[in-house]
Structures are given as C-alpha cells and as structure tokens.
Image (cartoon, rainbow, N blue to C red):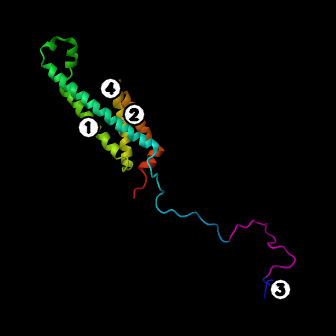
Amino acid sequence: MSFGDPNNPYGPPQGQQQGYGYPQQPQAPGYGYPQAPPAQYGMPAGPTTMPGTVSAARVMMWVIVGLQILGVALFAFTAASVTAAKNDDELRDNASFQQLADYSSGAIWALTVFALAWAVFAIVLAVKFNSGGNGVRITTLVFGIVTAILGIYPFIVVGLIHTVLAILIAVFVGNSNGAAWFNRPRY
C-alpha cells in the first residue's frame, strides 16, 4: 500500500485539498518545536569591569583621603602652635591670639585624631571597591552622606569640596551601576 494508491484509506482524500476545514498556516522550517534559548543556570552574570561611575566614586574617595591627610597635618600644626603659643608671654596681651587661645589644644588634637580616623576609614572603603559586596556599597553610601553633612556644618568654606565629593560618591555608588557592580557574583 502506498499513498499513490487511490484505494489507500490512509492517503489524502481524492479531490479535496490537504488541510480541509482548517485555515492554512505557514510552516516553520524544520519540524518540531522551535528551539528555546540556552538555559542559564545560577544567577545572571554581572559586570566584569567596574562601571565608570563606580570607578569615579573610588577616585573621589582617594581625593577625600588626600584632603583628610592635609587636614590632619593642618590640625596637628594648629594644635602644636596653640600649645606652644599659650606659654609665650608676649602673646598673652594680644587680643587676636586670645580668640585662638580660647580653643582648647585638646579639642584640636581630638579633631586631628577624628580626621585621621576618617581618612583611614576612607582608605579601607576605597580599597574594598574591587572585592567588596553590598555591605561595602551601603557603608560607602553612609560614609558619603555623613561626610557631606560634616562638610556643611562645622567646616563650611573648607568642607565645600568634601561636601560636593561626598554627594557625588553617594550618587555614583547608589545608582543602578553601583548596585550591579557590588551585587555581582564572585567566583
């Protein structure tokens, strides 16, 4: 029995079109179901190189470190000068020096230690940008916000650079590129 046989019950009916009663549909090349996209196992891959905004935030962290070190040197010099000048008899009668002498040298040394600790904290965060996870991102966001606030309140003129850099760091680390970089899978 072949399909060419007019008496074949399995062949197409004589005189009818194939697919009678059904609308004609275009046939896909090949047969079976279309091929599915390749399966991805695990988490989707993150960026392999640091995005530009995150890299800029890291550079700004190093700029803040440099400014902090300059501030530490300035505070230490000021504290040492005030301590030495308080013992000078000629400056006791000077009115402009008395305004400076009203500051405690211990308070200035405390500011020096705080500025040094803040610089060390910035160094640790800047170094962790390559290998750190989401915790480094959140800590850097908090660092940027606190630095911006400290740059505004006590040190308005000098802290303006700190404020601008800290706001940019918080924005660059907090955007979607920063989230993708710090949440990428590490193998």
Q: Residue type at mark 1?
A: Ala
Q: Quick one: SS at disc 4?
A: loop
Residue bearing mark 4? 155
Residue bearing mark 1? 117
* Other-residue count near label 3 (Cα within 10 Å), few / some / many at <14 / 14–19 / ≥20: few
The magenta stretch is 11-30
Which residue occupies 81% across, 73% down?
A: 18
Label 3 vs label 1: CA separation? 96 Å
Which residue occupies 43% across, 43% down?
A: 54
Residue 16 location, x and y as percent?
A: 85, 75
Label 4 vs label 3: CA separation? 100 Å
Which circle's residue, 4 or 2, is located before the other in the chain?
Answer: 4
Residue bearing mark 3? 5
Which residue occupies 38% across, 39% down?
A: 59
Q: Give the answer, above or below, for where 27 lies relative to 147.
A: below
Label 4 vs label 2: CA separation? 14 Å
The prevailing secondary structure element of the residues shown in magenta is loop
Query: Which of the image's four quarters has the N terminus?
Result: bottom right
Which circle's residue, 4 or 3, is located before the other in the chain?
Answer: 3
Q: Quick one: SS at disc 1?
A: helix
Q: In front: 38, or 153?
A: 38
